[in-house]
Image (cartoon, grey):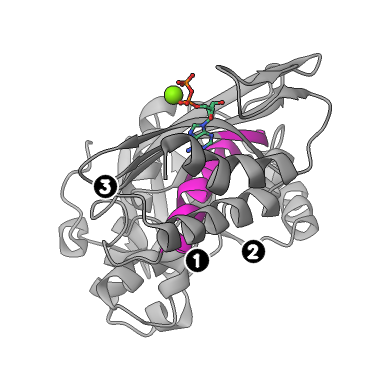
Amino acid sequence: MTEFELIQRYFAQAAAAQPHGADVSLGIGDDCALITPPMGQQLAISTDTLVSGRHFPVDTDAFSIGWKAVAVNLSDLAAMGATPHSVLLALTLPDADAAFLAELSRGIFAQCQQHGVRLIGGDTTRGPCLSLTLTVLGWLPTGSAVCRHGAQVDDLIVVTGTLGDAAYALRHPHSPLQHRLDRPEPRSTLGPRLRGVASAMLDVSDGLAQDLGHILRASALGAALIAEQLPLHPIVAALPLAERLSLALTGGDDYELCLTVAPHRLAELHAVADASQTPITVIGQMTAQRGLSVLHHGQPVDMTLTGFLHFDR
Ligand code: ADP
Ligand code: MG
């Protein structure tokens, strides 16, 4: 199979069959794709690489690899409040295994279809190890992006879904939470609805404590979290305290949203979360006092017990 045949068979044909608006005037096949930006919108653009053995276990099935590569990138768009539009795929393959490529392509297009995004281009090369670099494009009304620096003192800290599931799955192969590691679901429906509601936002990819730390630094504030309010899957909730806190605070790969909201806008937040059928939980509050504190039934939690040592106070 030549590179050209490979691109045609596994990417170009399926991409051509994807629905798209008139704003994509040229997709796969030329040197560049051509998109007409909507009036009054800003382009939100982000890229993330997934390397085999580093960002997913080497034995992950091909469908899940494709799915996850798209999902983690769409999660970045959701975290800015952007509406996803299209993706580009730079693929490095050790060999051109037809069965693997067919499943990889199915996973990529399944996730694209679920979120209404179109594959508009990419690059394909041979290399020593499987790696996928996705670039996602989305739109935002100019000036409406939800950034990390907007949190205010006393804003409530809110997360979607449950925390620590993917890290649990990584430590316990073939558990009922395996799908949370392999097939993350980016919060693309809720994200755009949080423009003008959330004061700051990001997606939780490296663990809550570390990611929330980015909001704290960017907003020059601190935070107090209430450990017993952290939303946990029943399997994680049944673990001993130190273990479940470790998973919830330091476990990566959940791709949930963490956002801050002014207390008087909480009802509005619940309304948009309900409208997009996304569970949300208030887990703490922003503080003028810098640093992250975690309270369990009013007592400070020693963060070193959770395996979290690197927080920059
Ligand atoms: P060039 O040499 O001009 O970079 P390529 O042969 O790399 O062209 O790619 C041909 C076309 O196929 C381009 O439109 C490119 O965007 C697209 N393409 C290449 N690889 C992929 C891929 N893995 N997924 C989607 N589109 C791809
Ligand atoms: Mg190329």
Assign ligand 2 to one image quadrant: top left
> Can see residue 310?
yes
User: At label 2, which amino acid type do we have?
Assistant: Pro
| Image coords of residue 248 (percent x, y) | 36, 63
Q: Report the front residue among 38 and 157.
A: 38
Q: Secondary structure at mark 1?
A: loop
**In the rendered structure, are the residues bearing label 2 and label 3 in contact, judged by CB atoms less than 8 Å apart?**
no
Q: Is residue 186 magenta?
A: no
Q: Report the front residue among 132 and 137.
A: 132
Mark 1 surroundings within 10 Å by alpha-carbon count, few (fewer than 14), some (14 through 19), many (20 or more): many
**In the rendered structure, are the residues bearing label 2 and label 1 in contact, judged by CB atoms less than 8 Å apart?**
yes
Q: Characterize the magenta stretch by its predominant secondary structure.
A: helix
Q: Is 247 left, or right, of 53 in this rendering?
A: right
User: At label 3, which amino acid type do we have?
Assistant: Pro
Vertical position of residue 205 compared to residue 82: above or below: below
Please give the name of the residue rendered at 59% of the width and 25% of the height, measured from the top-left corner.
Answer: 44
The residue that mark 1 highlights is 162
Please give the name of the residue rendered at 64% of the width and 34% of the height, measured from the top-left corner.
Answer: 86
Q: Quadrant of the C terminus?
A: top left
User: At label 1, which amino acid type do we have?
Assistant: Thr
| Image coords of residue 154 (percent x, y) | 53, 40
The residue that mark 3 highlights is 94
Q: Is 302 left, or right, of 296 in this rendering?
A: left
CA separation in Å, label 3 and label 1 = 36 Å
Q: Quadrant of the N terminus?
A: top left
Q: Earlier in the sequence, mark 2 or mark 3?
A: 3
CA separation in Å, label 2 and label 3 = 40 Å
Q: Secondary structure at mark 2?
A: loop
